[in-house]
């Protein structure tokens, strides 16, 4: 129970710390006169992915690379099959062709690129730098596109995030320090708890990374997408999911690889990375046919995700989930 308690407390600290850091950073950037469009594409993008980033860096530094790569791969799979599938039971989602053409194609290309890089002795510093530079290029192009289209949604999101944060600079900085401290402590607890669970259950760290850790770090996206489904804003939610997946690959993997070499185990090369690529492709038929992701598709997505998780413990390691849950 102590192991699960560490994981649960770690997730809480990550979520609270990430929220505090994002809101404080947005308020500070807005106070300094930074364009809200720039804030939305940089501060918000990096800040909302801070929990996953800290978990991956912490795992890499603590010699648990399986949790680092597993977190990114598992999160990307969960973001499509679970985070899109579950809200689709509430209301149909439309995959806007424009969003799929930009974020969707970029996500597929990034997924394929990581598979190619991973085959050459894992992900090292220079490939990590390449991934990060590609992210910078994508964000710059997104900035130009948003300015040309007069995108107001990013400005509205920045304004909403900055609400409720006191204008006093000292309070803002204190809130940022609290957020960073929460992220550091939360990532440490989550990684240590996940490693202990893997050892006690007799499964690899990769399995725990793509399931337990990835599911935990995907909870904010799931909550956001579910709320969007109730508000009938599914198209916005799809864009957020695609953007999150793209940032996971290019940003989180890129930065983590620059900090420490990320070896990719054979199991991921043969199975998990290809599932991630398949999940990246699964939304394109809906966009091309201009049909919504409805309840039937949602059920199929959820069953596919359940099958993936079960395969990790039965088909991959032979460990029944019931044994893991009964620790």
Image (tube, helix red, strand yellow):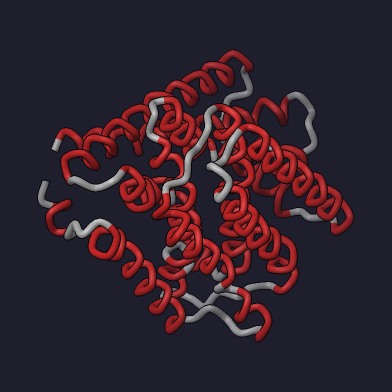
Q: Is residue 285 above or below residue 71?
A: below
Vertical relation: 148 (above or below) 155: below
Q: Position of residue 190 (x, y in %)?
A: 33, 34
**Quadrant containing the N terminus in the rendered view:** top left
Using residue 265 as the reference point, say whether residue 314 is left or right of it: left
Q: Compared with residue 15, is residue 210 higher up or lower down, i.e. above or below? A: below
In this rendering, would 298 be left or right of 21? left
Q: Residue at x 59, y 35 (%)?
A: 124
Residue 17 in the figure: left or right of residue 137: left
Residue 208 image offset from top left, x and y in percent: 31, 47
Q: How many marks?
A: 0
Residue 189 in which image quadrant? top left
Q: Is residue 212 above or below residue 33?
A: below
Q: Residue at x 82, y 50 (%)?
A: 141
Of residues 314 and 234, the one drawn nearer to the viewer in this rendering: 314
Which residue is drawn at the image coordinates 48% and 31% (left, top)? 57
Task: Give the camera-side residue of 33 and 117.
Answer: 117
Q: Single out the residue that lies furthest toward the top.
A: 170
| Residue 84, x across and y down, in percent | 48, 67
Specify the farthest residue to the right: 148
Q: Looking at the picture, how far across and down is residue 261, in whole percent?
A: 53, 32
Tell me the quarter of the picture where residue 166 sits.
Answer: top right
User: Looking at the image, which residue is at 72% across and 26% down?
Assistant: 31
Is 159 on the left-hand or right-hand side of 52? right
């Amino acid at each position: 129970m102590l192991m699960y308690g560490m994981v649960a407390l770690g997730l809480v600290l990550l979520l609270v710390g990430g929220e505090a850091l994002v809101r404080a950073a947005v308020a500070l950037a807005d106070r300094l006169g930074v364009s809200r469009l720039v804030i939305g594409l940089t501060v918000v993008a990096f800040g909302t992915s801070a929990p996953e980033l800290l978990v991956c860096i912490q795992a890499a530094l603590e010699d648990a690379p399986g949790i680092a790569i597993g977190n990114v791969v598992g999160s990307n799979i969960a973001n499509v099959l679970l985070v899109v599938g579950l809200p689709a039971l509430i209301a149909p989602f439309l995959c806007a062709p424009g969003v799929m053409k930009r974020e969707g194609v970029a996500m597929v290309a990034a997924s394929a690129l990581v598979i190619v890089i991973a085959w050459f002795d894992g992900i090292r510093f220079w490939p990590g730098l390449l991934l990060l530079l590609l992210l910078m290029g994508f964000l710059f192009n997104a900035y130009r596109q948003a300015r040309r289209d007069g995108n107001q949604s990013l400005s509205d999101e920045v304004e909403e995030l900055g609400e409720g944060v006191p204008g006093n600079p000292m309070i803002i900085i204190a809130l940022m320090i609290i957020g960073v401290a929460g992220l550091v402590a939360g990532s440490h607890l989550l990684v240590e708890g996940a490693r202990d669970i893997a050892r006690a259950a007799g499964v690899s760290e990769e399995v725990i990374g793509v399931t337990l850790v990835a599911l935990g770090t995907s909870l904010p996206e799931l909550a956001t997408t579910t709320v969007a489904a109730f508000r009938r804003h599914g198209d916005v939610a799809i864009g957020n999911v695609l953007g999150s997946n793209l940032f996971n690959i290019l940003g989180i993997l890129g930065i983590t690889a620059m900090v420490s070499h990320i070896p990719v185990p054979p199991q991921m090369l043969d199975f998990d990375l290809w599932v991630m690529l398949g999940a990246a492709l699964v939304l394109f038929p809906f966009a091309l046919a201009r049909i919504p992701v409805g309840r039937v598709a949602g059920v199929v997505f959820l069953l596919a995700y359940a099958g993936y998780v079960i395969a990790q413990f039965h088909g991959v390691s032979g460990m029944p989930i019931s044994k893991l849950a009964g620790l």
